Image (tube, rainbow, N blue to C red):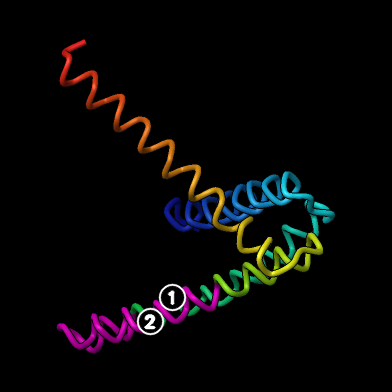
């Protein structure tokens, strides 16, 4: 196996564990009852439809031009929504949550990330403007 292929597999494995871990911690903060292993398994199954990304990319390449890009965008969007729905179901089942609480578990890390980026941006602008 080439280094690039090995790195892709290792990166995929690490991101699966890290994302499941972050979502598990958020779920625990929100009162979740599930175990990390259950979360890991269900999140793995939830992301399984991503195997269709390669065929979607191939369709875009073979179709060519703007039409191919549009087809890939539409199919990729459907795939992304499908995976998000499965993520919500996985969180809901793993932690015995309502659908709303599962959605909050999925959205909360993104909100925290956006707030942190905004704070860093404001501090950076302040430092640049005041030449500190």
Q: Is residue 60 magenta?
A: yes
Residue found at x 34% / y 77%: 57
Q: CA distance from mark 2 to mark 1?
A: 5 Å
Q: Is residue 111 above or below residue 116?
A: below
Q: Is residue 17 left or right of residue 108?
A: right
Q: Is residue 21 left or right of residue 47?
A: right
Q: Which is nearer the eye, 17 or 110? A: 110
Mark 1 lies on a secondary structure that is helix
What x and y, as percent, mark residue 96?
Answer: 81, 64
What x and y, as percent, mark residue 68?
Answer: 23, 85
| Magenta-drawn segment | 58-83
- Quadrant of the frame with the C terminus: top left
Q: Is residue 102 above or below residue 13?
A: below
Q: Which is nearer the eye, 53 or 7? A: 53
What x and y, as percent, mark residue 105?
Answer: 63, 55
Mark 2 lies on a secondary structure that is helix
Mark 1 and mark 2 in contact (Cβ < 8 Å)? Answer: yes
* Residue topped by disc 2: 56
Q: Quadrant of residue 83?
A: bottom right
Residue found at x 59% / y 69%: 47
How crowded pointer 1 is (Cα within 10 Å; few <14, some 14-19, many 20+) is rated as some
Magenta: main secondary structure: helix
* Residue topped by disc 1: 53
Q: Is residue 48 above or below residue 126?
A: below
């Amino acid at each position: 196996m080439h280094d690039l292929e090995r790195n892709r597999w290792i990166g995929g494995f690490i991101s699966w564990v890290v994302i499941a871990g972050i979502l598990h911690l958020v779920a625990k903060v929100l009162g979740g009852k599930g175990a990390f292993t259950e979360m890991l398994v269900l999140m793995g199954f939830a992301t399984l439809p991503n195997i269709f990304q390669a065929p979607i990319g191939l369709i875009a390449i073979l179709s060519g031009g703007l039409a191919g890009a549009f087809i890939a965008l539409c199919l990729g969007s459907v795939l992304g929504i499908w995976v998000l729905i499965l993520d919500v179901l996985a969180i809901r089942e793993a932690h015995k949550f309502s659908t709303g609480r599962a959605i909050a578990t999925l959205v909360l890390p993104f909100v925290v990330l956006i707030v942190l980026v905004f704070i860093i941006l404001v501090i950076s602008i302040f430092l640049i403007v005041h030449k500190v």
